Amino acid sequence: MTVQSVTVEGAGTVELTVVERGSGRPILLLHGGAGPGSVLGFAQLIADRHGAHVYVPTHPGFGGTPRPPWLTSVPLLARVYAGLIETLAQKDVVVVGNSIGGWIGAELAVSHPGRVGSLVLVDAGGIDVPGQPTVDVFSLSLEEVVRLSWHNPAAFPKSPGPPSDADRAVLVGNRAALAVYGGNPPAADPTLRTRLAGLRVPTLVLWGESDRIVAPEYGRAYAAAIPGAQFHLLPGAGHVPQLETPEALLAAVWPFVEARPPHPSG
């Protein structure tokens, strides 16, 4: 784990906690509202199987990390991660984002296309789709969120005991950060869907067939908004396939990555 200092011009500086796994082709893996722990296992899987260098930043405010007062939106987070890619001196980065992490990844690819080599959206949020609202997770209990997020809620890992005070504090912080970035109740950027029409980054949109937080029809609309984007349903998965069906997710992601060799200068 490292801490990277990133300055966003005209806004401020933020200290980013970044976990790294493996070495090789750079992949920026952006977590959703479940926090950085929800993607670390998948990061390790990618590194072990394919020798990629996976960077997993914690969105400030998640995981007990501080969030500077100026960092209040997805577009600002996208600017932070564009700065992180520059700080890491990486090029042709594969950006993979789940849930709000997908929203951030889409904004990053649209607003900083030179930083992104290809984009993978996994049950992403952030666009307005008439008739396909996203579920207000803030109005639900954890049990209800799990029921709507997982294809098989019975497979959700059970805690061996009640959460500690420290665990509760992290969960509260995660929820507060999600509300700041994504809105409470969850909102969308009314301009993003239109702006996606200008995206020229190769894009793969993956969706759990049983996602009841953000329905597959929403995912199809996401893919349709991006020129040339591919869309695939993931059987036996819900909103967090990196937790529920990581092998199937990797089997969908890696051929897309491999079909686009890194740029010689990357």
Image (tube, rainbow, N blue to C red):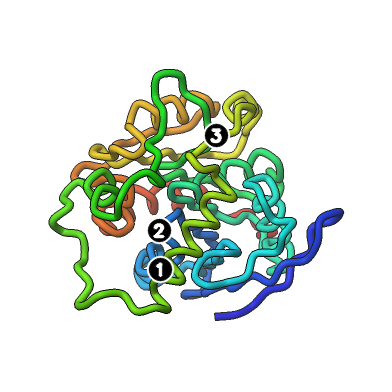
> Which of label 1 and label 2 is nearer to you?
2
Q: Nearest the camera: 114 or 218?
A: 218
- Residue 211, relative to residue 133: is it above or below? below
- Residue 191, relative to residue 254: is it above or below? above
Disc 3 versus disc 1: distance between alpha carbons? 24 Å
Residue at image point 59% right, 73% down: 17
Residue 56, how many percent across, how many down? Answer: 51, 66
Residue at image point 35% right, 26% down: 217
Task: Name the element at disc 2.
Answer: loop
Instruction: For label 3, count other residues whose C-alpha is less than 10 Å away and answer few (under 14), some (14-19) or many (20+).
Output: some
Residue 221, how many percent across, how many down? Answer: 44, 25
Instruction: For label 2, count other residues whose C-alpha is less than 10 Å away and answer few (under 14), some (14-19) or many (20+).
Output: some
Disc 2 versus disc 3: distance between alpha carbons? 18 Å
Instruction: For label 1, count other residues whose C-alpha is less than 10 Å away and answer few (under 14), some (14-19) or many (20+).
Output: some
Q: Quadrant of residue 50?
A: bottom left
The residue wearing badge 3 is: 188
The residue wearing badge 1 is: 37
Task: Name the element at disc 1.
Answer: helix
Q: Which mark is residue 84?
A: none
Q: First in sequence: mark 3 or mark 1? A: 1
For badge 3, the amino acid type reads: Ala
Q: First in sequence: mark 2 or mark 3? A: 2
Q: Nearest the camera: 153 or 84?
A: 153
Q: Is disc 1 in contact with disc 2, using a CB cutoff of under 8 Å?
A: yes
Q: Please identify the quadrant where the C terminus is shown.
A: bottom right
Q: Is disc 2 in contact with disc 3, using a CB cutoff of under 8 Å?
A: no
Residue at image point 33% right, 57% down: 242
Disc 1 versus disc 2: distance between alpha carbons? 7 Å
For badge 2, the amino acid type reads: Ala
Task: Name the element at disc 3.
Answer: loop
Residue 171, how many percent across, how many down? Answer: 42, 65
Q: Which mark is residue 34?
A: 2
